[in-house]
Image (spheres, rainbow, N blue to C red):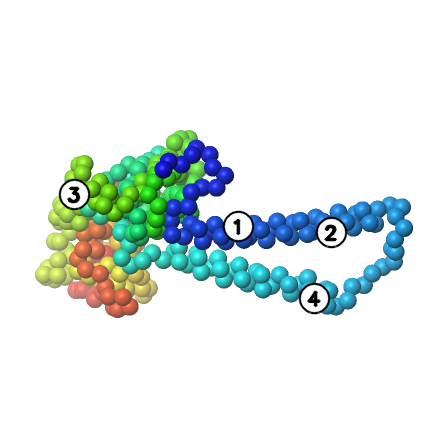
Amino acid sequence: MDNAEFQLFPDAASTVASRVDALFLFMTALTVFFTVAIAGAILYLGIRYRRGANVNRSQYSPPLWLELSWLLTPVPVVIFVFIWSSQLFLEMQRPPKDAMEIRVVAKQWMWKLQHPSGRREIDELHVPTGRAVRMTMISEDVIHSFYVPAFRIKQDVLPGRYTTTWFEADTPGTYHLFCAEYCGTNHSRMKGRVVVQTPSEYEEWLGGGRRDQSPVVAGAALYEQFRCGSCHAPTVTPLRAPPLEGIYGRSVKLANGATVTADDSYLRESITRPAAKVVAGFQPIMPVFEGQISEEGLSDLLAYLKSLGAADSGAGGATEGGSGEGAKP
């Protein structure tokens, strides 16, 4: 099912789309109700008290209950809308733990996407129905915005920082993918499509075409190429850098006394600009890799680091300091 070029209301093809629509329509109805009521009152009073009309024009002091009604009546309505929208917003910000991760690199003017198996796409994304998909996104140049109207999702994609969004498609079809942030002269050409397939069709598609290396395998190759293990291997004596096994998701104590979580953004920064956040107990001797590794390469390295093991939820342990001669992350 292809979208028509112009639609008054886009298709609803994700599990949250109908709920977003319900909130939107409720707020629209609320706005229309008060607009009509207030405009009607203004029109009525304008006609009734027009010049020359025989009406009582003495000053009127409304009773207290009428004054309070204007203040108190909207309160429960506003609280109701706040709770409703907050619940929906928080749900849309928290992907399920078992969500399939798609890596996205945006640049002027294309979307580069990679599946967990390693298969890559440009300006086109295939996803199965009935499975949550988490998008981890970064930009190579300027601010973009990943926008799929049929899924009711829109998330800014920033240079130097990972952002995420997620969805679960529930209706097979082909849907528009737009950049919703003006990103340069050819911004209007930065568009694509999302192809939603049944799980069996998706597996068949995934198994066809060119076989790309998985991000973990590609990341391991980069790890060896840049000889990261010469400092980060736990067998190195004296220890010059923190071991990376189980680093993902852990709390890390820094030399300045702060504590950060070793998430995608922290690990990326630690690779590209190691001196930005130095781990407590180590020296900033790691070379700068900014500009030496592509965003796809950094994404592969992060996938490899994740494969080394993630911290248990709520573990909160800090990385141990070393001999004081090493670098970081």
Q: Nearer the viewer, mark 1 or mark 4?
A: 1
Give the crowd class for mark 2: few <14, some 14-19, many >=20 residues within 10 Å.
few
Residue at x 44% of width, y 60% of height? 87
- C-alpha span from label 3 to label 4: 67 Å
- Residue 134 location (% of width, % of height): 31, 51
- C-alpha span from label 3 to label 2: 68 Å
- C-alpha span from label 1 to label 4: 28 Å
Of label 3 and label 4, which has the lower sequence position? 4
On residue 213, the disc is 3
Q: Which residue is mark 1?
A: 25
Q: Which residue is mark 2?
A: 41
Residue at x 25% of width, y 47% of height? 199
Give the crowd class for mark 4: few <14, some 14-19, many >=20 residues within 10 Å.
few
Q: Which residue is mark 4?
A: 68
Q: Amino acid at mark 1?
A: Leu
Q: Quadrant of the C terminus?
A: bottom left
Q: Quadrant of the N terminus?
A: top left
Query: Which of 21 and 95 lies nearest the eye of the viewer?
Result: 21
